[in-house]
C-alpha cells in the first residue's frame, strides 16, 4: 500500500516565495548582466529597472591615460562614444550607480532632453560629503575652495540636487572649467532643438582612491545619429598649483602641477552646429570673443552671436543686463562684457539660473 504525501497550502506558498526570491536575486547578479548597482529614474519618478545603459565599448582605462601636463581634457577612443542601438531605444531615463563599499560613485547616465533639462536654481547640496572630501582653501584657486561637489550629470541637464550618487569630489578647475565646457554643449543643443542626447559620465578611480583621477564624459545626439553632438573625453581632476593625494583627498600647495594650457577646445568634439572642432591650443579668451573668433566648438563664432552680459566678479556668475540680480549688484563687483557666452564659461563664469543668459 502506497502512502500519498500531501503539502499544506502554507508550505506551498513558502516554496513559491523562496523560488521567486531566488529568481530575483539571480537576475540582479552583476555577473549575469542584471540590475545590481543601478538606481533608475524614469519619466520623473524613481523605479526599479532591469535595464541600464550598456557597458561602453570605449570605456577608458587609467593605465592608458597619460599624466596631466597642461591639457585639461583629452580624447578617448578618438572622440567616439560607446553607446549601442539599445541605449537609444530605451526612452527617457536617468541611471545613477549605487555607492561602492568605499562610498564612491559609479557611472551616471541618461537620455537628456527637454523633459530633463532644468533652468531652476540649484538647490542646497552642502549636506553631501562625497568620498575624499578634505576641503582646503587656496587664495589662487577660483572662489578659493579647492573642491566642488561635482555633479556627474549636471544639474542643468537633469535637475538633480543633493543626490549622493551623482556628486563626487572634484577640483574647481575640473568642475567649473573642464566639465562645464561639455555640459554646455549638450544643454545648449537640447534647449535650441528640443532633441535628445545620450549622455554618460564615469568617474575613474585607481585602486583604493577616494578621489577620482578624472571623469570620462560621453555624449551622442539621438535624432540625427550623432551628427550634432558626439564626444568621448577624459577630464583630469586636477588643480594647478595644488598636489592631491587621491587615496585620501589630502592636498597641499605644489608647483609640480602646471597651469592649464588647453581646455575643452583641445579635443576633437562635434558641437551643436555639426562641425568637428579641430585640436588646437587655447587662444586668448576675451580678446577672441571681442574679435568674433573663439575656441567654442558648440557654435560658429559669428558677430551675431555676441551679446552683452553683466559679470559679478565676486560670485563669478554672469547675467542678462535686465536681470534683477544684475540691477542690484554692487558696483565694485560689476563688470560689463560683450562677446561670446562660451568665452565666459571658459573663464570659469557660470550662468545665472534666474535669467538663464
Image (cartoon, grey):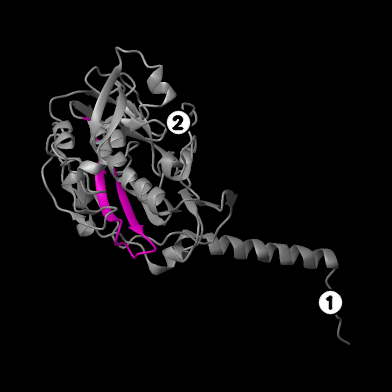
Q: Residue at x 14, y 53 (%)?
A: 278
Q: Is residue 107 visible?
A: no
Q: How many marks?
A: 2
- Give the x, y percent position of residue 206: 29, 44
Pointer 1 or 2: first along the chain: 1
* Callout 1 crowding tier (Cα within 10 Å): few <14, some 14–19, many ≥20: few
Q: Nearer the viewer, residue 267 or 3?
A: 267
Asked which secondary structure carries label 1, the reply is loop
Q: Nearer the viewer, residue 35 or 84?
A: 84
Q: Residue at x 20, y 56 (%)?
A: 276
Asked which secondary structure carries label 2, the reply is loop
The numbered mark at residue 251 is none
Quarter holding the N terminus? bottom right
Q: Disc 1 marks which residue?
A: 5
- Give the x, y percent position of residue 163: 49, 38
Picture layout, residue 15 above or below residue 190: below
Judged from this view, the residue extending furthest toward the right is 1
- Give the x, y percent position of residue 319: 36, 28
Which is in the foreground here, disc 1 or disc 2? 2
The numbered mark at residue 354 is 2
Q: Is residue 6 left or right of residue 330?
A: right
- Give the x, y percent position of residue 71: 16, 41
Judge whether residue 238 is colored magenta.
yes
Judge whether residue 103 is colored magenta.
no
Q: Nearer the viewer, residue 103 or 96?
A: 96
Q: Residue at x 24, y 23 (%)?
A: 141
Q: Start and end of the magenta stretch?
A: 214-239
Q: Is residue 309 visible?
A: yes
Amino acid at each position: 500500500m502506497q502512502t500519498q504525501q500531501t503539502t499544506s497550502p502554507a508550505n506551498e506558498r513558502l516554496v513559491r516565495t523562496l523560488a521567486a526570491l531566488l529568481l530575483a536575486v539571480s537576475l540582479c547578479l552583476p555577473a549575469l548582466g542584471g540590475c545590481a548597482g543601478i538606481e533608475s529614474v524614469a519619466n520623473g519618478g524613481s523605479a526599479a529597472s532591469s535595464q541600464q545603459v550598456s557597458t561602453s565599448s570605449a570605456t577608458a582605462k587609467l593605465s592608458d591615460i597619460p599624466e596631466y601636463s597642461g591639457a585639461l581634457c583629452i580624447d578617448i577612443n578618438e572622440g567616439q562614444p560607446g553607446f549601442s542601438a539599445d541605449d537609444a531605444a530605451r526612452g527617457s531615463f536617468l541611471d545613477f550607480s549605487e555607492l561602492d563599499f568605499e562610498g564612491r560613485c559609479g557611472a551616471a547616465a541618461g537620455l537628456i532632453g527637454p523633459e530633463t533639462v532644468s533652468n531652476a536654481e540649484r538647490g542646497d547640496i552642502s549636506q553631501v560629503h562625497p568620498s575624499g572630501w578634505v576641503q582646503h582653501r587656496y587664495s589662487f584657486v577660483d572662489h578659493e575652495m579647492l573642491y566642488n561637489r561635482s555633479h556627474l550629470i549636471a544639474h542643468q541637464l537633469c535637475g538633480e540636487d543633493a543626490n549622493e550618487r551623482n556628486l563626487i569630489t572634484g577640483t574647481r578647475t575640473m568642475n567649473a572649467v573642464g566639465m562645464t565646457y561639455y555640459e554646455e554643449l549638450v544643454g545648449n543643443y537640447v534647449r535650441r532643438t528640443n532633441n535628445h542626447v545620450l549622455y554618460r559620465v564615469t568617474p575613474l578611480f585607481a585602486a583604493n582612491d577616494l578621489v577620482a583621477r578624472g571623469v570620462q564624459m560621453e555624449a551622442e545626439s539621438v535624432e540625427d545619429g550623432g551628427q550634432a553632438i558626439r564626444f568621448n573625453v577624459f577630464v583630469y581632476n586636477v588643480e594647478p598649483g595644488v598636489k592631491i593625494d587621491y587615496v585620501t583627498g589630502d592636498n597641499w600647495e605644489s608647483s609640480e602641477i602646471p597651469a592649464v594650457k588647453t581646455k575643452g577646445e583641445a579635443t576633437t568634439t562635434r558641437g551643436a552646429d555639426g562641425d568637428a572642432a579641430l585640436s588646437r591650443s587655447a587662444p586668448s579668451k576675451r580678446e577672441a570673443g571681442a574679435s568674433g573668433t573663439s575656441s567654442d566648438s558648440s557654435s560658429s563664432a559669428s558677430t551675431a552671436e555676441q551679446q552683452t552680459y553683466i559679470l559679478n566678479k565676486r560670485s563669478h556668475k554672469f547675467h542678462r543686463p535686465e536681470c534683477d540680480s544684475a540691477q542690484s549688484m554692487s558696483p565694485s563687483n560689476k563688470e560689463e562684457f560683450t562677446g561670446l557666452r562660451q568665452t565666459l564659461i571658459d573663464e570659469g563664469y557660470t550662468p545665472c539660473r534666474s535669467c538663464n543668459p
